[in-house]
Image (cartoon, rainbow, N blue to C red):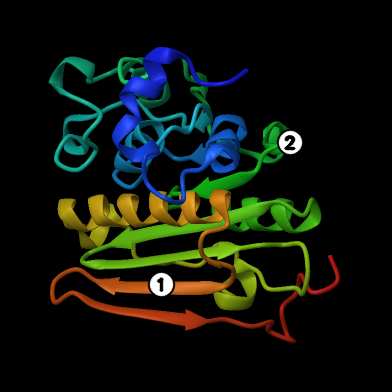
């Protein structure tokens, strides 16, 4: 199934770009993306993936919308408070492209439902939950699935794609914290709304770059301080002491 005439009209300004040839447009059409966590990063991320032509999306999040979410989670409004984030996000995004195939699970990702991540091109983790991130990382490693970790807190962003098909490099190599590490979270140290938005946009671009093979994003940790706009891209390598080296 290819894009409809309506979709070609919606995406016409993008599809005239040089790298959006027929082959790459087909890649976008067929790509399957999972987003875990529908918060401040995932809202702009999902919006820009859909508005870039990505059609097959799956969402996981058991949270309901609260008033404190509205400052940075831009898919939601006061009218949505008390509703499941995944279901509201799906409805909003289908208004941009009604031909999208969006599966929304109003539930948290756990060991019991991890198999729903199979047969996916890229899994994007924006959960702000270390236990869930480690769970996704291990599953992607064991099943050779591409995994993007995207995090924002205070004014700081961390994003990295783990390719999981060649040499072992994983989230645990980078952050060998304990499963129950007491790490800072947005509800304790705060987060800039703009920081979350920028993280979503950059994650969306890394996803498109990966789908279209326009730039090698593998194992490059992008660090951004949005308060002073410092940006670092660090090549990460296997940690020989990683407990998942032989998993």
The answer to whether residue 130 shows anywhere in this view is no
Under circle 2, the secondary element is loop
Using the image, determine if residue 160 lies above or below residue 2.
Answer: below
Q: Is residue 152 above or below residue 52?
A: below
For label 1, the crowd category at 10 Å Cα-Cα, with few meaning under 14, some 14 to 19 and many 20 or more, is some
x then y, percent, for residue 189: 23, 63
Name the residue rendered at 64%, 57% in the picture: 137
Residue 85: x %, y % from top left: 36, 26
Give the residue at x 77% y 74%: 167
What separation in Å lies between label 1 and label 2 (alpha carbons)? 27 Å
Side (left or right) of 18 relative to 191: right
Q: Is residue 47 left or right of residue 122?
A: left
Instruction: Return the residue nearer the eye: 147 or 201.
Output: 201
Left or right: 21 with respect to 10?
A: right
- Label 1 sits on residue: 222
Based on the displayed image, in which of its 4 quarters is residue 226 positioned?
A: bottom left
Q: Would you say 119 lies left or right of 87 here?
A: right
Q: Quadrant of residue 86?
A: top left
> Looking at the picture, how far across and down is residue 170, in whole percent?
65, 69
**Residue to which mark 2 is pinned:** 119
């Amino acid at each position: 199934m290819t894009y409809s005439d309506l979709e070609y009209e919606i995406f016409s300004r993008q599809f005239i770009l040089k790298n959006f040839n027929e082959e790459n447009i087909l890649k976008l059409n067929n790509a399957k993306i999972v987003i875990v966590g529908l918060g401040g990063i995932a809202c702009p991320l999902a919006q820009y993936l859909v508005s870039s032509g990505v059609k097959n999306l799956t969402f996981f999040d058991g949270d309901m919308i609260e008033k404190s979410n509205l400052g940075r989670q831009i898919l939601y409004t006061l009218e949505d408070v008390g509703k499941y984030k995944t279901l509201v996000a799906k409805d909003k995004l289908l208004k941009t492209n009604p031909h999208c195939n969006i599966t929304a699970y109003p539930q948290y990702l756990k060991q019991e439902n991890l198999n729903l991540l199979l047969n996916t091109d890229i899994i994007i983790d924006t959960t702000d939950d270390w236990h869930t991130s480690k769970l996704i990382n291990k599953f992607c490693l064991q099943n050779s699935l591409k995994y993007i970790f995207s995090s924002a807190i205070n004014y700081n962003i961390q994003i990295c794609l783990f390719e999981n098909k060649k040499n072992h490099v994983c989230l645990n190599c980078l952050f060998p914290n304990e499963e129950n590490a007491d790490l800072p979270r947005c509800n304790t140290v705060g987060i800039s709304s703009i920081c979350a938005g920028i993280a979503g946009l950059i994650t969306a671009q890394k996803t498109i770059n990966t789908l279209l093979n326009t730039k090698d994003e593998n194992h490059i940790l992008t660090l951004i301080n949005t308060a002073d706009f410092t940006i670092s891209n660090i090549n990460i390598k296997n940690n020989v002491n990683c407990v998942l080296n032989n998993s």
